[in-house]
């Protein structure tokens, strides 16, 4: 269902030229339900999300269920339980969620809780706020029935102790020191939602927050247009408010892939020297179920699950 920009513009122009009745008859079919997510672990996440979507469930429930899969997997060193710690040896987690009505919830620098995406959802549904951080986020999670757990596994602790010997911090592209699950879905009712969750850059400074819990940077959903999520060096994504930018570029008629590419190019324009070595990837889904991705460096994979397939793809890249 990937479409070129020209096809996309043609379809949009044709649809908007028609009166409503004939538009309903001849509008291009919407590919729904569908769920897409970042990196190889997206495949298992999508499978969980698909159980909900294929039964007619809501995109919001699907993205939360999907995001919880790598969060709960101790072998994934970039999300939730087993995530690599900050430079002080603390696992601090960032997550957010956004629904079709524009409701949002987010937690940042949250410790001791395996499923920050579900805490973010509670922030969205139970508080008058949109974001809780650190101690306050933990207090809220515990008050809402989440269990305090040890997130630092033996393996992650070993990796951190090895890192301590040199203490060099360099956000290198595509190695295990970063990765995020960003997951967006379109349900059978035609509604979009998204979620994003990560342990952030490994060995980051204590208190560092990346793009992933920041609505507009690491995730954005606009039910009229589409949804986008990001992965890679969060500082660069925040600088351009990346996912909001991708959605707005889709609103202007760009296909999901083209919009992701334009956002990546914006990062290069802001920071041409750094961009050659760091990784950022965007992934987007339109209201009609088209999807696309783009990244700076080769190696960003993403997973797609719809009624026809359940597959991994390599995103196109600049370098
Ligand atoms: N974007 C995440 C962050 O900066 C990490 C990643 O996706 O690799 O925290």
Image (cartoon, rainbow, N blue to C red):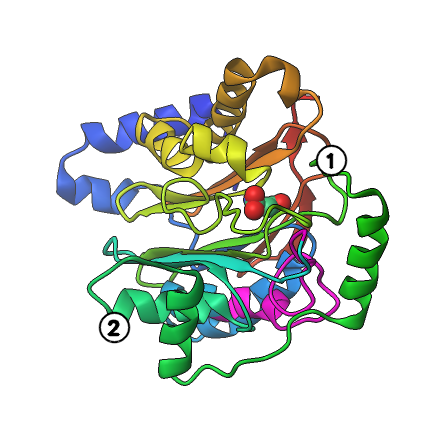
> Is 274 or 41 nearer to us in this picture?
274
- Asked if the beta carbon under badge 2 is closer than 8 A to the nearest atom of ligand 1, the reply is no
Residue located 73% across and 38% down the image: 299
Is residue 114 found left or right of 171 in the rendered image? left
Residue 136, image x, y percentages? 37, 67
In which quadrant of the rendered image does the C terminus lie? top right
Q: Which mark is residue 300?
A: none
Mark earlier in primary sequence (2, 1): 2
Classified by dominant secondary structure, the portion drawn in magenta counts as loop
How crowded pointer 2 is (Cα within 10 Å; few <14, some 14-19, many 20+) is rated as: few
Up-down relation of residue 114 to residue 314 (above or below): below
Q: Within the magenta stretch, is there residue 241?
A: no
Q: Which residue is mark 1?
A: 172
Quadrant location of residue 125?
bottom left
Magenta residues span 65-87
Q: Secondary structure at mark 1?
A: loop
Figure quadrant of residue 154: bottom right
How packed is label 1: few (under 14 Cα within 10 Å), some, or many (20 or more)? Answer: some
The residues tagged by marks 2 and 1 sit, at their Cα atoms, a distance apart of 38 Å
Q: Is residue 128 left or right of residue 2?
A: left
At a point 76% along the width and 63% down the height, the residue shown is 156
Is 75 part of what is drawn in magenta?
yes
The residue that label 2 is drawn on is: 126
Quadrant assignment for ligand 1: top right
Which residue appears at 50% of the width and 55% of the height?
183
């Amino acid at each position: 269902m990937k479409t070129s920009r020209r096809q996309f513009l043609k379809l949009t122009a044709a649809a908007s030229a028609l009166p409503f009745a004939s538009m309903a008859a001849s509008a291009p079919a919407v590919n729904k339900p569908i769920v897409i997510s970042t990196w190889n672990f997206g495949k298992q996440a999508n499978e969980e999300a698909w159980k909900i979507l294929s039964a007619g469930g809501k995109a919001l429930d699907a993205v939360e269920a999907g995001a919880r899969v790598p969060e709960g997997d101790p072998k994934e060193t970039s999300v939730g339980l087993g995530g690599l710690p900050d430079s002080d040896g603390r696992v601090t987690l960032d997550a957010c969620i956004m629904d079709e009505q524009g409701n949002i919830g987010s937690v940042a620098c949250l410790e001791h809780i395996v499923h920050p995406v579900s805490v973010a959802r509670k922030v969205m549904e139970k508080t008058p706020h949109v974001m809780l951080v650190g101690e306050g986020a933990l207090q809220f999670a515990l008050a809402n029935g989440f269990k305090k757990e040890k997130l630092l596994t033996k393996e992650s602790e070993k990796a951190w102790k090895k890192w301590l010997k040199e203490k060099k911090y360099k956000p290198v592209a595509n190695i295990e020191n970063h990765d995020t699950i960003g997951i967006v879905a379109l349900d059978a009712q035609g509604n979009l939602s998204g979620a994003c969750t990560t342990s952030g850059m490994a060995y980051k400074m204590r208190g560092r927050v990346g793009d992933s819990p920041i609505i507009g940077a690491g995730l954005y959903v606009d039910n009229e247009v589409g949804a986008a999520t990001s992965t890679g060096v969060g500082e660069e994504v925040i600088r351009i408010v990346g996912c909001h930018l991708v959605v707005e570029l889709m609103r202007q008629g760009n296909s999901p892939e083209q919009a992701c590419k334009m956002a990546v190019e914006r990062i290069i324009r802001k920071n041409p020297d750094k961009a050659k070595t760091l990784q950022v990837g965007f992934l987007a889904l339109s209201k009609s179920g088209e999807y696309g991705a783009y990244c700076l460096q080769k190696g960003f994979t993403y997973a797609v699950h719809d009624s026809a397939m359940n597959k991994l793809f390599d995103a196109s890249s600049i370098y």
